[in-house]
Amino acid sequence: MQPFLPFTRPSIDEQTIAEVAEVLRSGWLASGPKVQAFEAALSEYCGARPVRTQTSATASLEHALLACGIGAGDEVIVPAMSFVATANVVVRVGARPVFVDVDLSTRNIDLDQAEVALTARTRAIMPVHLCGMPVDLDRLYALAAHKRLRVIEDAAQAMGSSYRGRRIGSFGDLVCFSFHPNKNITSIEGGAVVGGSPEEVRELELHRFHGQMKTAADAFETYFAGGKANLTDVAACVGLGQLRQLESFNARRRELAMRYFQLWGEDPPLALPPRGDAGHNWHMFAARLPLERLRISRLQFIEAMAERGIGIGVHYPAIHLFSAYRALGYREGQFPHAERIGRETVTLPLFPAMRLEDVDRVVGAVNEVLREATR
Ligand SMILES: *Cc1c(COP(=O)(O)O)cnc(C)c1O
């Protein structure tokens, strides 16, 4: 039996491990020189824009909304298909998430529907580059400019993606990345907000550290009762080591994704993602099962794959069908594409340390399970 193949796994190199050991010996563990260096390196990567790290993308998104002054009485446009954090942060700042459906193939926000969902209370739109596939940002930013909306990009999955040759994060309004271990680069836990006016950047700094700022060598001021979401130097050191490898990680992901397409050719037994263009970072390879033609459920498919030593992920259930959002009045049937993706989606293994033979193994197992299960 071959070793179990998870759907994702981080790659930490020996150099990074040695550098983390140095940080641990240095006497400075919380936010210090490594956090500054990580922010500087991210800023350089994003075209010299301001970067403020946080302990997660969730904190980054929440603080970005707060820095824009979004709160009670405001509406924020959010796709119904994403990780739940995208909508949770809107609720947490006191605003209302207004869901819109996604395109069935790209899984990204349907901008026609976003336009229809706008009201006098809409303050912002939060596009999500799902699986690393960039949203049509030219059209989105044209709409935002026309309606005077802020844009908070949930780029948690989009590190290293680009839109029309420009890196995600190097342009646009406020762009939030995640460095969770499942993402294309990790700092164990971590996130960052890229962009913002000097006033907004200051707000982000306050929100990540008690609402407090040093005003003199012996004095602090606390402007509001803030929380705490500052990154540690240990985490930043891991992030720096990962950022060095981002391009090679993403090149490897692309190679593996292309192997899936190559092996399945013109007639795959499940709905594959669009091939994307050069700007896709292949954060995930998410397909849809043809459940109407199968005698097994998705759960049974996942179990059959696990029996063959292969891990399958589910990204994601439609957000509006969670009880927390049904409680806001959302119902089944409102966003058919998001609901269908939520029922049918399966994430196949894809991570930089995978071998091409691992892709062959996954394709062989999927073909076998689906052949046996077809009506
Ligand atoms: C992972 C993820 C988040 C949350 O990131 P954390 O760093 O774990 O808080 C938010 N949105 C999307 C789309 C994600 O994939």
Image (cartoon, rainbow, N blue to C red):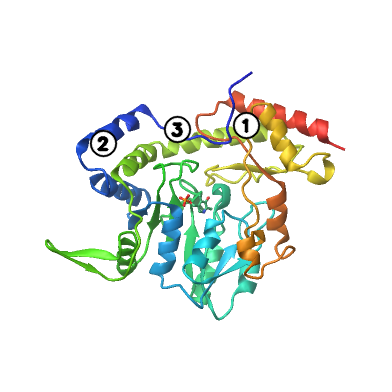
Q: CA distance from mark 2 to mark 3?
A: 20 Å
- Left or right: residue 129 compared with residue 26: right
Q: What count of labels does the image hold?
A: 3
| Label 1 CB-ligand 1 distance < 8 A | no
Q: Residue at x 62, y 31 (%)?
A: 259
Q: Amino acid at mark 3?
A: Ser
Q: Residue furthest bottom?
A: 120
First reached walking from the N terminus: tag 3 or tag 1: 3
Residue that badge 3 annotates: 11
Residue at disc 3, secondary structure: loop
**Marking on residue 24:** 2
Q: Residue at x 51, y 72 (%)?
A: 95
Residue at disc 1, secondary structure: helix
Q: Nearer the viewer, mark 3 or mark 1?
A: 3
Image coordinates for residue 273, horizontal then vertical, percent: 66, 45
Image height check: is 88 above or below 150?
A: above
Residue that badge 1 annotates: 259
Q: Quadrant of the N terminus?
A: top right
Quadrant in which residue 97 is drawn: bottom right
Image coordinates for residue 17, horizontal then vertical, percent: 34, 31
Q: Nearer the viewer, residue 359 or 25?
A: 25
Image height check: is 48 above or below 77?
A: above
Image coordinates for residue 343, horizontal then vertical, percent: 72, 50
Asked if residue 341 can be seen in this view, the reply is yes
Q: Quadrant of the C terminus?
A: top right
User: Mark 3 Cα within 10 Å, few/some/many (few <14, many 20+)?
Assistant: some
Q: Amino acid at mark 2?
A: Leu
Looking at the image, do the residues carrying marks 1 and 2 touch, with CB atoms under 8 Å apart?
Answer: no
Asked if residue 264 can be seen in this view, the reply is no
- Left or right: residue 272 compared with residue 350: right
Q: Residue at x 40, y 36 (%)?
A: 245
